[in-house]
Amino acid sequence: MSIRFISMRTSSWSWSRMLRERRYSSSHWEARARLEEARRHPMDPLAAGVWVTDPAFEHVLLVKHRVRGWVPPGSKVEPGEAPRAAAPRELLEETGLRSELLPEPAAVAVRSYRADWSPTLGLSYAAVAERDVPLAGEQNQPAAWFRLVGDWDSVFPEDRERIRAPSGSRPDGRLPLR
């Protein structure tokens, strides 16, 4: 499984910090080019997901995928559907949770899930939700809250740092959760 990623935080404080610290991946420009291509015309495959945290930025909501382990809710964008519409649909289907997304995608990833599949452009949106809301996920795919400072089993272990990164560089001056 080949994985390439670039954070696409839209706020200037995070983007400038990422560039200054050179935290972007070597595939940054490829991911950015694929995103621009997707804006011009439909692209396949295209995926959308949601990084849901609690208001204190201490927990993240994940679903147990049968192959990938614990991952953020999300999946393939349906034909004719916009990623921004697919993300909350997937969140509702996989967790039973309705939540407003933050205005812009939090991240963009280009992933090859299998050698015989085309690379998938995935947009990850962010949302904030209270942890006391009942969860009702899909059958055989439970949803659960995990501490951001903890670990969870996933075939994408690098996602932990990607999801944690925005909370570690918040403009409100609060301390990172590391």
Image (cartoon, rainbow, N blue to C red):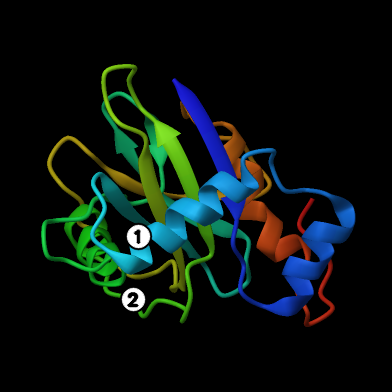
Q: Position of residue 114 (x, y in %)?
A: 32, 20
| Left or right, 65 with reference to 137 | right
Q: Residue at x 33, y 70 (%)?
A: 133
- Which structural element holds mark 1? helix
Near-viewer residue (13 or 132): 13
| Amino acid type, mark 1 | Ala
Instruction: Determine whether 15 is above or below 13 in the image.
Output: above
Q: Which residue is mark 1?
A: 38
- Please identify, in this view, whether the residue under mark 1 or under mark 2 is nearer the observer: 1
Q: Residue at x 47, y 29 (%)?
A: 154
- Which structural element holds mark 2? loop
Q: Where, quadrant-wise, is the N terminus in this rendering? A: top left
> Residue 130 falls in which quadrant of the image?
bottom left
Q: Position of residue 17 (x, y in %)?
A: 83, 64
Q: Residues within 10 Å of mark 1 (few under 14, many from 20)?
A: some
| Amino acid type, mark 2 | Ser
Q: Position of residue 172 (x, y in %)?
A: 78, 82
Q: Which residue is mark 2?
A: 99
| Left or right, 6 with reference to 79 | right
> Residue 90 falls in which quadrant of the image?
bottom left
- N-term mark: 1 or 2: 1
Q: Are marks 1 and 2 in contact (CB under 8 Å)?
A: no
Q: Residues within 10 Å of mark 2 (few under 14, many from 20)?
A: some
> Residue 32 falls in which quadrant of the image?
bottom right
Q: Position of residue 178 (x, y in %)?
A: 79, 50
Q: Residue at x 76, y 57 (%)?
A: 177
